[in-house]
Amino acid sequence: MINIYLVGMMGSGKSTVGKILAKQLGKQCIDLDYQIEKKVGESIESIFQNEGELKFRYYETLELKKISNSVVACGGGIILSNENLNLMKRNGRIIYLKATLDELERRLIKSKNRPLLKNRDLRDSLEKILNERKRKYESILSISVHTDGLTPLEVSNAILRKL
């Protein structure tokens, strides 16, 4: 059965919107990062530090292959793996949750568990990551929803209207 993959930058609302959307669609919601942490027995930060980003992407691929008929809240960098992109394209619809740099910064200012932002200036780091990924997000999406100023329920409803 078809999956709904929520992609976008960290802080775009994938996990929160995923839970609401799954409930509305009668599907289960899978937070891919949480699944990986559970399976590997380490935090995402620890995996990045101890095993590196490539190994983390490998874990993403393994978990993606197991999922069906679900709403999947993907990690922000899932698009960096062509294998992951191909799996998502084959097995569902990709929904890009788009947020401006200002909105992402506002949402993430107090976040402590973001390995790619650790020990860096938040805005500069977000801008760099967004610039590196924006084109890729936009090239693979089935649907795009701009999340600035919307509640998670409003974002979920916008997705439902576009499905």
Image (cartoon, rainbow, N blue to C red):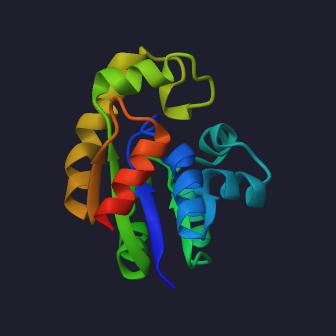
5 versus 89 height, above or below: above
Screen quadrant of the C terminus: bottom left
> Residue extending furthest bottom?
1
- Is residue 139 something one can see in this rendering? yes
Q: Is residue 162 left or right of residue 46?
A: left
Name the residue rendered at 57%, 79% in the picture: 68
Name the residue rendered at 46%, 17% in the picture: 120
150 versus 84 height, above or below: above
Name the residue rendered at 63%, 48% in the picture: 51
Name the residue rendered at 51%, 57% in the picture: 21
- Quadrant assignment, res 88: bottom left
What percent of the width, then of the height, locates residue 39?
Answer: 75, 61
Q: Nearer the viewer, residue 160 or 128?
A: 160
Figure disc tally: 0
- Is residue 61 something one can see in this rendering? no
15 versus 87 height, above or below: above
What percent of the width, then of the height, locates residue 73?
Answer: 53, 55
What percent of the width, then of the height, locates residue 15?
Answer: 56, 47
What percent of the width, then of the height, locates residue 35?
Answer: 69, 58
Q: Nearer the viewer, residue 76 or 55?
A: 76
